[in-house]
Amino acid sequence: MNSDTTDVDHRSDDVSLPPNKIFDLLLDRRRRHALYFLSRRVGAVSIEELADGIAHREGTQRPDDRERISTGLHHTHLPKLVEAEVVAYDPTTERVERLPGCEQLDPYLELAETDDLVHPCRE
């Protein structure tokens, strides 16, 4: 676990998300997998480590799959999570960190994770 967070830009800790935004953030399976991974880490992780964790969860270990996951994170999922102020992402250093605002997603993440374990192929 890495606790070095000096290279990740932090925003306001006082963010309250409306329910429709919470559900929008959790709608995508891969974005949920990213949030599950980050919820079990302390401090910033590399986008490569995050992509590897997601690939492992999805049962794929091929390098081209991990590259696709990393690209999707960089261009789609992380910007959406950054905009909601639940994660910080520095594209220069490729470091990602869960922010305190993400805690409000935790009850929904727990329910979604249980459902994902029971129905792993459902989007």
Image (tube, rainbow, N blue to C red):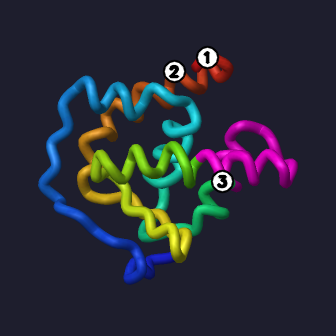
Height in image: 121 above or below 12?
Answer: above
Residue 111: in magenta span:
no
Residue 69: in magenta span:
yes
Residue highlighted by disc 1: 122
At label 1, which amino acid type do we have? Answer: Arg
Q: Residues within 10 Å of mark 2 (few under 14, many from 20)?
A: few
- Taking the spot 68% from the left edge, 47% from the top edge, the residue there is 69
| Local secondary structure at mark 3 | helix
At label 3, which amino acid type do we have? Answer: Ser
Q: CA distance from mark 2 to mark 3?
A: 24 Å
Disc 1 + disc 3, Cβ < 8 Å: no
Residue highlighted by disc 3: 70
Image position, residue 40 (x, y; %): 48, 55
Q: Quadrant of residue 119?
A: top right
- Taking the spot 56% from the left edge, 54% from the top edge, the residue there is 74
Residue highlighted by disc 2: 115
- Taking the spot 51% from the left edge, 29% from the top edge, the residue there is 28
Disc 1 + disc 2, Cβ < 8 Å: yes
